[in-house]
Image (cartoon, grey):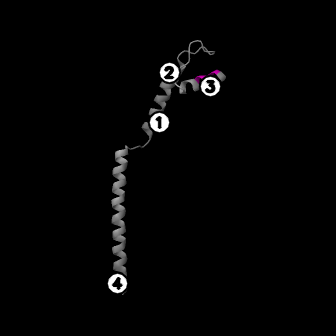
Amino acid sequence: MKAQCACVVQAFAGRGVDAGDEAGIINTGADLQKNLRATLSAGLSKLDVVTRQEFEIQREMLDVLRKQIDELTAQVEALEKAKRT
């Protein structure tokens, strides 16, 4: 178990495991890195993510819509006030 933990730490540090390792595992670091990349890639592909450009476009559209809502709200309030008097 201790040797497995060392393998994981070495893989994340970017130093693969040598053939002379206590567990006798060869290239475990490279295999772990490959598997980790595949797992992360598969997980990220399932997420609903957008590019920074798409995010900025949506944010700009939201800002425009907020301004329009504020203007319309002010118009409605003005009409309601005029109707009361």
Q: Secondary structure at mark 2?
A: helix
**Residue 81 visible within the image:** yes
Label 1 vs label 3, nearer the camera: 3
Quote the CA–CA distance across marks 2 and 3. Answer: 15 Å
Q: Secondary structure at mark 4?
A: helix
Quote the CA–CA distance across marks 4 and 2. Answer: 75 Å
- Quarter of the image for residue 61 reads bottom left
Q: How busy is the neighbourhood of tag 3: few (under 14 within 10 Å), some, or many (20 plus)?
A: few
Question: Counting residues from the N terminus, which is met first, the one under dot 1 or under dot 3?
Answer: 3
Q: Position of residue 32 (x, y in %)?
A: 52, 24
Q: Residue flagged by tag 2: what amino acid is it?
A: Ala
Quote the CA–CA distance across marks 2 and 1. Answer: 20 Å
Does residue 80 belong to the magenta stretch?
no
Q: Residue flagged by tag 3: what amino acid is it?
A: Cys
Quote the CA–CA distance across marks 3 and 4. Answer: 75 Å
Residue indicated by mark 2 = 30
Left or right: 22 as drawn, with respect to 73: right
Question: Counting residues from the N terminus, which is met first, the one under dot 2 or under dot 1?
Answer: 2
Q: Which mark is residue 13?
A: none
Question: CB under 8 Å between callouts 4 and 2?
Answer: no
Question: Counting residues from the N terminus, which is met first, the one under dot 3 or under dot 4?
Answer: 3
Residue indicated by mark 3 = 5
Which of 52/34 is in front? Answer: 52
Q: Position of residue 44 (x, y in %)?
A: 45, 37
Quote the CA–CA distance across marks 1 and 3. Answer: 23 Å
Q: Residue flagged by tag 1: what amino acid is it?
A: Gly
- Quarter of the image for residue 25 reads top right
Left or right: 68 as drawn, with respect to 42: left
Does residue 5 belong to the magenta stretch?
yes
Residue indicated by mark 1 = 43
